[in-house]
Amino acid sequence: MQELFKGITYLDLAASFSFLVFLTFFLSPKLEKNRLWTATVTPLASIIGSGYLVSAPLLYFALGDYAVFGMLGIVVLAYLIGEVIRYNILHSEPILFGRKKFKGYPVLLELESFSNLALSFAYMVSVAFYLRLLSAFVFSGFFERNPLYENLFTTGLLLFIGISGFLRGLEFLEFMEKYAVAIKLSIIFSFLIALTLYDVHHMHFREVFKPITFETFQILAGILLIVQGFETSKYLGEKYSPEERVKGMKLAQFISGFIYVSFIFLVTPILYTLPEGKVNETAIIMLASTISLVLGYLIRVGPLMSQFSAAVADTIGAGGLLWKETKGRISSKLGYLLTTIIGVILIWSANIFEIIAYASKAFAFYYLLQTLISLWVSLLRRHYLRSLLFFLVSLILLFVVIFGRSAE
């Protein structure tokens, strides 16, 4: 028995205890019944994929010890884009889908439909991508890599989500998503606590500073797409009121923003140990293993939960999108099934890792079109300060669409 506990450190105990505490909190019945939290889970699940694992080494090699400021800028920009979506939920939707028509209404409606078309494409590809990456994690961690078996496993996951959503609806998908998000957030927060304790004794910035170049901004533009997902709130109108969707999106962005910024700050002092160019999920997983044995195992489970919950969140978003665009002719349940069937086709007919680059551009293009809608409506409503903000955001998004490098 002594040999069993011999290698366990205070970091292992801290990681284990904090994981159990957070898991108990996130699965508490009181939280489960809170509508604000249930409205928050879907956008939060979509925002926090395994991107936080990729972004840390990527930002470090782009900005050195200033990596946290790069992430802070990305989070602030994402919040401003979220403000665009929230404005459209509260102010543009009543105009777009109300009875009152006005000059320029058809053009505005076309912009909305075109942006939704771009988003639906991005969702369908991203769902397939998330689950294909989950399969890669499973086989690389527990079995021998085999593309055929990985595709079959991905197909099974896609059909399970699609058929479950079709038969049981949004509530069942949210039920699955709730547990995946609870485990994922518990792992992330336990990781943050372990990193904090580790840094108390080992924090040392090595004064690694990188020159700011045009390529730096291209990389930052690509990382912006890692923190997307908050827009899913826009397509939960079948169950939640506009006010609930807005509050849920804000809370999701606050939580995810805190996680991303604090994670980058805490992990930056130890990223110098990574070899140049090591900018994938494995880099942080291996780093966590050197800090804590327990944390190493927990962080291996994290990406599985991240990919699954993000795939479910985007399936929910796609189904809600189809329900909204067809004015109810295609139910959200059927939309869930159609999304996953298209995902199966993509898995077997294309290289999903190449297609995701186009999906990333589609997300940025969607945000740009949504910003143009909010700019138009804010001018109509004479919200001129908002108009100025939306104009500036549209210029940044145009840069992302043209020059951004896909962080995926």
Image (cartoon, rainbow, N blue to C red):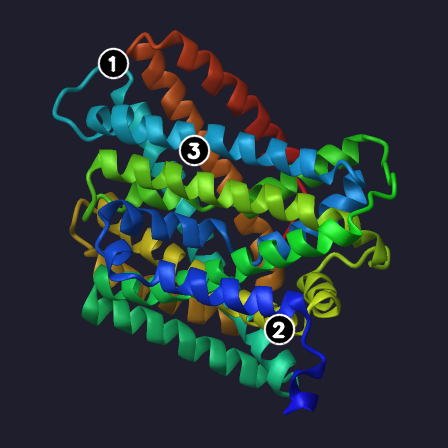
Mark 2, Cα crowd under 10 Å, few <14 / some 14-19 / many 20+, is some
Residue, disc 1: 103
1 or 3: tag closer to the N-terminus: 3
- Circle 3 — which element? helix
Closest to the camera, between mark 1 and mark 3, is: 3
Name which quarter of the figure residue 206 lies in.
top right
Q: Position of residue 149 (x, y in %)?
A: 55, 85
2 or 1: tag closer to the N-terminus: 1
Q: Residue at x 32, y 56 (%)?
A: 316
Q: Residue at x 71, y 56 (%)?
A: 198
Quadrant, the C terminus: bottom right
- Circle 2 — which element? helix
Residue, disc 2: 294
Name which quarter of the figure residue 248 lies in.
top left
Residue, disc 3: 82
Badge 1 amino acid: Lys
Q: Residue at x 55, y 60 (%)?
A: 190
Q: Where is residue 383 in the image (x, y as percent from the top left)?
A: 34, 10
- Circle 1 — which element? loop
The answer to which of 278 and 356 lies nearer the viewer is 278
Badge 3 amino acid: Gly
Q: Can residue 321 be seen in this view?
A: no
Question: From mark 2 to mark 3, how far is it between C-alphas?
Answer: 36 Å
The answer to which of 320 and 177 lies nearer the viewer is 177
Mark 1, Cα crowd under 10 Å, few <14 / some 14-19 / many 20+, is few
Q: Residue at x 29, y 17 (%)?
A: 104
The answer to which of 126 and 100 lies nearer the viewer is 126
Q: Describe residue 120's horizontal placement relative to residue 365 as left or right.
A: left
Question: From mark 2 to mark 1, how far is it between C-alphas?
Answer: 62 Å
Closest to the camera, between mark 2 and mark 1, is: 2
